[in-house]
Amino acid sequence: MRIDSLRIKNIGPFNEASVEFATVANLESGEQPITIITGMNGAGKSIVIDSIRAILSCQELERNIVADDKDFCVDVELEYDGTGMKHLSVSKLQSGHFQFVDYQNLHRLFSQGYKMPERVYEWVADYWSSKLPSDSFQIKNMVSIEHSKVLRDSMLGKKSNIALTNFICQVDYLRSSEMPKEKELGECLYSSVKSIIDECLDNGEFLYVRRIDSTPIVRQNGLELSLEKLSSGNIFLIEHLVMLLCKMYSVCVLREMESSNITRIPGLLLIDEIENHLHPKWQKKILGIIRRTFPNLQIILTTHSPFVVSSIEGARVYTCVSKGDHSVIEDETDKYTHLPVEEILASDVFAVSSFNDDITDLMKRRKELIGIGDVIGAKEIEAKLIEINPEYFMYLNL
């Protein structure tokens, strides 16, 4: 699945707005595109994500995003069945839900799952909210994963600690299977689970599944711990990444794919406020971890974090800007490309400076001079900045 564009009318704070998402992979690295949406609180960042969720699933979301029941629309251009771009449009409500004619029953996959036997698409879709599940990690007995439900409720962002434990335990048992194909699949999945958990822990690693009570065990800072003993940031990363792997496992089973291709299954990942629960160090690392683990995902995310905005080269960056009685969406990719965190913090959207007033004034003046094309004046200010803090501002000479 790939989404090319979104157009909305009278949705949230937007009278009319459109977004062209990043869709072209990096030709050198093969990495898939990332679209970052940022802006002040209340400017409409999450509305963009919610519009996509609503039109794909036609399910009731956590809030009503329609500003005018009698005059609204959400249009998307997307590809999902291998036959080229499709146009989906909705401008009617039924019992509070989006209503549109979907001849491919795309919305049914997100509300009910596949009706077997049925064509299974070779992609996944997922939505990450900032909410962590509150259920127990402890399971009494393992239950079979319903692979046909791989897409069901994925646009609602529902996660479960029990489901996480259940999947990790199933992977552990699969690799002990006496059936060669199951064993191979289990080994592949176990390697991916371990790699994910290892990446998500500072000074830690995944150790084993304690089979006597079906408990995954990790080591962190020299201590053996069960998952519930980890911090909320660690759990957020592990929960979402491992359960995304579980979705890919289901697609692999349904389509009878080679196990070696599991993590390369393409798809769409929507993330709202990705920085929540995460230390700035992890805010800067998270997109790189997702890309390395699942290289064929199109990622569309919202964030307040300059660390996230500055963490990935080649991302398309939009800002949602309030104009008083409505908001607009502006493409500011060129503005934020290659900017360090300090300059992103000082930009209009973030309006925060980590420097003293003298340095902030110099940086602001440099920006103004660059804007009017005064290269010589800008260079003079850069020389002053380098003199004040040569270690940091040396990048201006590059």
Image (tube, rainbow, N blue to C red):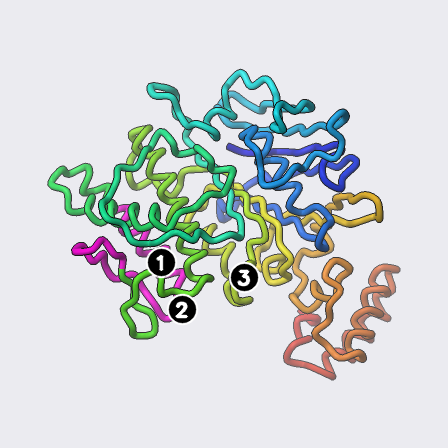
Q: Which residue is mark 2?
A: 202
Q: Which residue is mark 3?
A: 283
Amino acid beneath label 3: Gln
- As drawn, is 214 to the left or to the right of 380? left
Q: Which residue is mark 1?
A: 197
Q: Nearer the viewer, residue 275 or 20?
A: 275
Residue span colored magenta: 188-216
Q: Secondary structure at mark 3?
A: helix
Residue 270 falls in which quadrant of the image?
top right
Amino acid beneath label 2: Asp
Residue sitting at 30 percent across and 37 percent down? 145
Q: Secondary structure at mark 2?
A: loop
Q: Is residue 192 magenta?
A: yes
Gap in angstroms between the C-alphas marked 3 and 1: 16 Å
Gap in angstroms between the C-alphas marked 2 and 3: 14 Å
Q: Secondary structure at mark 1?
A: helix
Determine which of the numbered discs, if any, sits on residue 266 in the image.
Answer: none
